[in-house]
Amino acid sequence: MQVDRAAGYTPFLIIATGGTTGAGAIDPINEIANLAEREHLWLHVDAAYGGASVFAPEMLDLLHGIDRADSITFDAHKWMSVPMGAGIYITRHKDILHRTFSITADYMPKEGLIWM
């Protein structure tokens, strides 16, 4: 990261893998979380496949540190027999989804306005 910063780049994100689909490989999430914290970077964990491990107590340690992530993806269709498009994005930052997906325009109702 120091090399990137010295070259004028601004790292902002680290992505850790919480279980690859093909091999089930899992990054050392807790150690990566330490780095993200030290460098003030957003930590995202792609747990699309391996995230289901949190439901099995004997496998929970495999994802040690995932609770420190800023955001996590989890694909429910891979383990929960739901339709393919059922992906889940979880974040600890309450306002991020609102800021990302909100649309405001003069012709649209403002918050608090109730349509009957």
Image (spheres, rainbow, N blue to C red):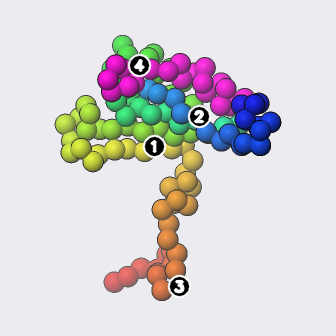
Which numbered circle lies on residue 14? 2
Query: Residues under labels 3 and 4: Cα distance?
Result: 49 Å
Q: Who's the residue at 60% across and 24% down the image? A: 32
The residue tagged with tag 1: helix, strand or loop? strand
Q: Earlier in the sequence, mark 4 or mark 2?
A: 2
The residue tagged with tag 3: helix, strand or loop? loop
Q: Who's the residue at 21% across and 45% down the image? A: 83
Query: Residues under labels 2 and 1: Cα distance?
Result: 16 Å
Query: Residues under labels 4 and 2: Cα distance?
Result: 17 Å
Query: Residue 109: percent from the left, percent from the top?
Result: 46, 81
Q: How many marks?
A: 4
The residue tagged with tag 2: helix, strand or loop? strand
Q: Residue flagged by tag 1: what amino acid is it?
A: Ile
Asked if the residue under mark 1 is in contact with the one under mark 2, i.e. CB atoms within 8 Å, the reply is no
Q: Is residue 112 above or below residue 43?
A: below
Quarter of the figure that contains the N terminus? top right
Q: What residue does disc 4 label?
A: 25
Q: Nearer the viewer, mark 3 or mark 4?
A: 4
Query: Residues under labels 2 and 3: Cα distance?
Result: 37 Å
Q: Which residues are magenta?
A: 19-38
Left or right? Give the position of 109 relative to 59: right
